[in-house]
Amino acid sequence: MEKKKFYITTPIYYPSGKFHIGTAYTTILADTIKRYKELRGFEARLLTGLDEHGQKIQEVAEKEGKTPQQHVDAIAEYAKNLWNIMDIKYDDFIRTTEERHINQVEKIFDRLMENQDIYKGEYEGWYCTPCETYFTETQLKEGKCPDCGRKVKKMKEEAYFFNMKKYTGRLIKFYEENPHFIEPDFRKNELFNNFIKPGLEDLCITRTSFDWGIKVKKDPKHVIYVWLDALVNYITALGYETEDDTLFKKYWPADLQIVGKDIIRFHAIYWPIFLMALNLPLPKKIYAHGFIMMKDGKMSKSKGNVVYPEMLIERYGLDATKYFLLREFSYGQDAVFSPEGFVERYNFDLCNDLGNLLNRTIGMINKYFGGRLPKYTGKINSADENFENQTIATIKQVEEQFENYHINTALEEIWKIISMTNKYIDETTPWVLAKEEKTKELESVMYHLAENLRKVAIMLKPVMEKTSTEILRQLGIEKEEIISWETLEQYNLLKQDIKVIEKGEPLFVRLEIEEEVEAIKERMKK
Ligand code: MSP
C-alpha cells in the first residue's frame, strides 16, 4: 500500500550568526512532528535551509571582512553541523543562493509580472533595516518598528510592487473556509485586526539600496525583496516548474509549516497570496510557536544571557535538552528558560520519575524472577484492571495531543502514565507480595510495569530517540512488531520469555542543583 505523505517545513534561517535555543526550537519542533508522523506510517519529508540574501547579511559579511558568499558558506556548514549534533532528520537543506532556487525565483517574478500581479511604481515609507521591511505611518508603534521596536528611517525609491489588494477578499474567504489554517487561533485574530481589517497595502517587493540578492532579470538594478525570495523556497526546493518536478507533485501542498510568532504575518498573509497568484494550492496549516524568553527579557549577546543548544547538549545530552524545550512551551505561547528550571526538570522528570521507574522495575524483575519477565496472566484484580484502563485512556490523550501537534501536552500525558506507574508500585507493594509469597500477584505487577515502560518508550520515541531505545534495550524488548505505535493499547504482547538486563544503568544521573545552575550561567556569558 502506498504510504500517506506528509510535508513539513521550518523557516529558512538567516545566516547572521549562531543559532540559540530559541531559534533551534523551531527546527526541534518540526523534527519531532516529522518523527511522530513517521512512527505513524507516513512518508514524511522535512525541509529546512538558509535565507541567505539581503542587506543584513551583506552588512554582517562586510564587518567580518568577508564576501557575503564566503560568510553564508561558513554559516551553512555551521548550521548543517548543528542539525547533525541535534540529530535533525531533514530531507533537504535549501540555500537561497543555490542555482536551483535562483532560477525559479526569476521565473516566478516574470510570471507575476506577466499576470500583472507585479507593477512598477515609487515607494516612500518607513524602513526598518534589521527587519528589511517597509512600514506605513499607521503601522509604526510609537514611531518605531512594530516588529523589533528599533528606529526606522524614511526612504523613497523606484520599486516594483505586488498587488496585495487584489487578493484580500480571496484571502479572507480562505480563512473563513479553513478555520484551522492558522494556529493558534489568537494569532489569526491578531493578524486580522492589525493587518487585514485596516486594508492590505500593496507590497514593495524590490530594493535598490544594496545588491546582495536575486536581481530582476530585465531591470537588474532592482534586487528582489528577501521575503519574496525566501518564501518561495518551500516550492523551489521541491523542483517547482523544473524539468523534474516529481517531488513537487508528490508533496505540495505542505501539510504543516512551522514558524515563530514573529514571522507569522509573512507566512499567513503574503505567502498564501503569492501562492494564489501562482494558482497553486495553499498549505494546510501554518503553526506559529511562541518565543523562548529569559527572565530578563529577550536573549541577547549584550545582556550575556544567550543559551546555545550545543552547550546544553554537551553537558546534559540531546534528549534532556529536547525534552526541556518541548515540555516548556505551551501551544503557541512563550516560554521562559532558566537554569534552575532546566536542572529541576532534569532531576524531577527525567531522573526521579522516568529513570527511577525503569531502575526499580529492572531491579525487581531481577530480584524476584532472576531477570525473566513473567507471563501475562490477565487482569487478576481490580487494581490491575483500573491500572490498565487508566493507562489506555491516557494513551488516547497522548495520541490526540501528538495529532494536534501539542507536543508539550503529549509529554505531560506521557508523564501522567509514568507517575501512575510509579504509584502502582507504591500501592501494590511488590516487596510485601514477595514476602507473603503471593507469586501470582507479584508476576502480574512485574508484567504490568514492563508493559507500561514499553508503552512509554514507544511514545517517547519522536522526542527522545536514544532514551526510548535504551529503555527497550534494558527491558530486553527488541522485536520490531512489539515496538510499533499500533501495539500501544495491547497488554499481552510480551509473550516470549523476555530477559531484562542484569543491572540497569541509570538513564539520567541526578544533578547537583547549585553546581549545575552555576555551570549553565557561566556558559551563558561566553
Ligand atoms: N529568514 C527568516 C525566515 C524566512 S522563511 C521563508 C527568519 N529567520 S531567523 O533565523 O530569524 O529565525 C528562524 C526561526 O527562529 C524562526 O522561526 C523564528 O521565529 C525563530 N526564533 C527566533 N528567535 C526565537 C526565540 N527567542 N524563541 C523561539 N523562536 C525564535 O525569520
Image: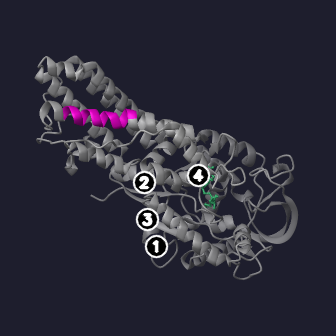
Q: Name the foreground residue: 74 vs 431.
A: 431
The quarter of the picture showing ligand 1: bottom right
User: Quarter holding the C terminus?
Assistant: bottom right
The residue sitting at 84% across, 57% down in the picture is 152
Counting residues from the start of the chain, the first of labels 4 and 1 encountered is 1
Q: Are marks 2 and 1 in contact (CB under 8 Å)?
A: no
Counting residues from the start of the chain, the first of labels 3 and 4 encountered is 3
Direction from residue 22 to residue 142 in the image, left or right: right
CA distance for labels 2 and 1: 22 Å
**Residue sitting at the far front:** 515
Q: Amino acid at mark 3?
A: Asp
Q: Are marks 2 and 3 in contact (CB under 8 Å)?
A: no
Density class for disc 1 (Cα within 10 Å; few <14, some 14-19, many ≥20) is: some
**Residue at the spot of label 4:** 523
Q: Amino acid at mark 1?
A: Asp
Density class for disc 2 (Cα within 10 Å; few <14, some 14-19, many ≥20) is: many
Counting residues from the start of the chain, the first of labels 2 and 1 encountered is 2
The residue sitting at 68% across, 47% down in the picture is 298
Which of the numbered marks, if any, corresponds to residue 91?
3
**Residue at the spot of label 1:** 245
Magenta part of the protein: which range?
352-365
**Residue at the spot of label 2:** 34
Q: Is residue 245 above or below residue 3?
A: below
Membership of 291 in magenta stretch: no
Percent of width and height locating residue 44: 40, 58
Counting residues from the start of the chain, the first of labels 2 and 3 encountered is 2
Q: Amino acid at mark 4?
A: Arg
Q: Name the foreground residue: 240 vs 224.
A: 224
Counting residues from the start of the chain, the first of labels 2 and 4 encountered is 2
